[in-house]
Amino acid sequence: MKKPTRQMLPSLAILVLYVAGLAVAAAPPMPRGQQVHLFEATVRVADGGMDEPDEYNYRLLATVLGSVEAARSVTYETYPGTFSAFLTNNQARRLSKVPGVLEVRQRDDPVPTDGQ
């Protein structure tokens, strides 16, 4: 492997900053100062199954988070009839009131969101 030359350093620095920016952009949106927990939601499954159960789960969660993309970014697992997502207590409480959601329960200890 060739050693980087002085001409390559600016390009390498830009590449590193670009990759770091992608990593930050891919991180789930977390409210500052609020504890985030892993919650599991049990949802109503339509008779005869669903064509796209993952998309159905994302749409239910999107009613609380504002978009399907935000729902995807906090989802840990998704299966027909259930999904797990990293949410604040307030978000979980609001999700439990969404039509089609049967139960929301906490699965783990809080995840710090503000570097503490």
Image: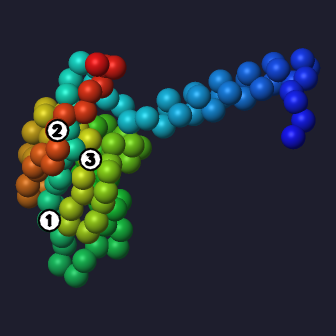
Residue 51 percent location from the top left of the image:
34, 73
Count neighbours of disc 3 (C-alpha within 10 A) and say few if under 14, some if 14 to 19, many if 20 or more.
many
The answer to whether any part of residue 99 appears in the image is no
Q: Quadrant of residue 37?
A: top left
Q: CA distance from mark 3 to mark 1?
A: 17 Å
Q: Residue at x 10, y 49 (%)?
A: 105
Label 3: state its secondary structure. strand
Please state which amino acid type lies under the numbered disc 2. Answer: Asp
- Front residue of 87/99: it is 87
Q: CA distance from mark 1 to mark 2?
A: 26 Å
Q: Which residue is mark 1?
A: 44
Disc on res. 85: 3
Residue 111 percent location from the top left of the image:
25, 33
Residue 25 percent location from the top left of the image:
50, 32
Apparent side of residue 26 relative to residue 98 in the rendered image (left or right)? right
Apparent side of residue 9 relative to residue 41 in the rendered image (left or right)? right
Asked if residue 72 is positioned above or below residue 6 in the image, the reply reads below
Q: Earlier in the sequence, mark 3 or mark 1?
A: 1
Please state which amino acid type lies under the numbered disc 3. Answer: Ala
